[in-house]
Image (cartoon, rainbow, N blue to C red):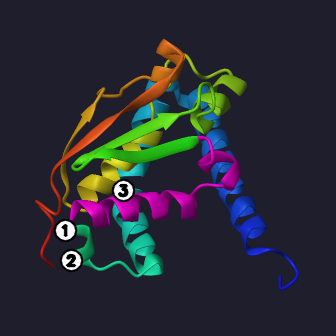
Amino acid sequence: MDRIEKNKVRDLLGKGWLTHDGMWFYHTCRELGVEKANALNKAAIRSLAPIEVARTRSILAMDTQELDTFDGLRVFLMEALELILPDSVFERFHLDSPSRGFLRWEWEDGECFAYKGMKRIGMIDGYRCGVMYRIECWLESLGIAYEINPRIEECIMHETGSCSGDIRVTRPGEGRDPG
């Protein structure tokens, strides 16, 4: 392990997670149909989000007060995504803040890993986006009040050829469980 670069290990683990996720979705679709696979995928994402956020906050050493500000939330999201996503995926996803209280996301055209994976396995028709749903679940588990535009259900890259939008943070930390 000492001779392997940390980024290569992180990339390998991230790609393994993405491949497992895609293969799980593929086999669930084949066994139960795309609607059931979408519902189970979203249920898994929702139940994973609080655990994933807590672990990520811990490794990034971010406390609750930092996430009570827009700037702290923005830094957390950017660092969390950089930590979790393989470099080959992270470099194609852009998250910035064009103005205070707004986050803008954008996938390079055709480069969302879920879009590419679902297309590759022949499951893009009927796929409901789990990627942005995951970020929404992170925000909810952090108690962040937000609005997302466009509201994503299907894969908008498949529907429109691109995937981008805005998240308006209305009140950082609102609704967070004080415990």
Is 51 placed above or below 113 here? below
N-terminal label among 2 and 3: 3
Residue 41 percent across, percent down from the top left = 46, 41
Q: Is residue 43 visible?
A: no
Q: Amino acid at mark 1?
A: Asp
Do tag 2 and tag 3 residues touch (Cβ < 8 Å)? Answer: no
Q: Nearer the viewer, residue 92 or 44?
A: 92
Of helix, strand and loop, which one carries label 2?
helix
1 and 2 marks in contact (CB < 8 Å): yes
Q: CA distance from mark 2 to mark 3?
A: 24 Å
Residue 179 visible in the shown view: yes
Q: Quadrant of residue 51?
A: bottom left
Query: Mark 1 to mark 2: distance in Å?
Result: 5 Å
Residue 80 magenta-highlighted: yes
The residue indicated by pointer 1 is 68
Which residue does the numbered mark 2 point to in the structure image? 65
Query: In this rendering, would 113 be left or right of 58?
Result: right
Asked if marks 3 and 1 touch (Cβ < 8 Å), the reply is no
The amino acid type found where label 3 is placed reads Ser
At 47% across and 41% down in the image, what residue appears? 131
- At 43% from the left and 50% from the top, the residue drawn is 44
Q: Residue 68: image x %, image y %?
A: 19, 68
Q: Which quadrant of the view contains residue 110?
A: top right
Give the magenta part as a residue range. 69-92
When the figure is inspected, residue 76 is found, relative to residue 20, above or below; the finding is below
In this rendering, position of residue 115 left or right of residue 148 = right
* Res 47 label: 3
- Disc 2 residue type? Gln
Given this view, does label 2 or label 3 mark the residue nearer the observer? 2
Cα–Cα span, label 3 and label 1? 23 Å
Secondary element type, mark 1: loop
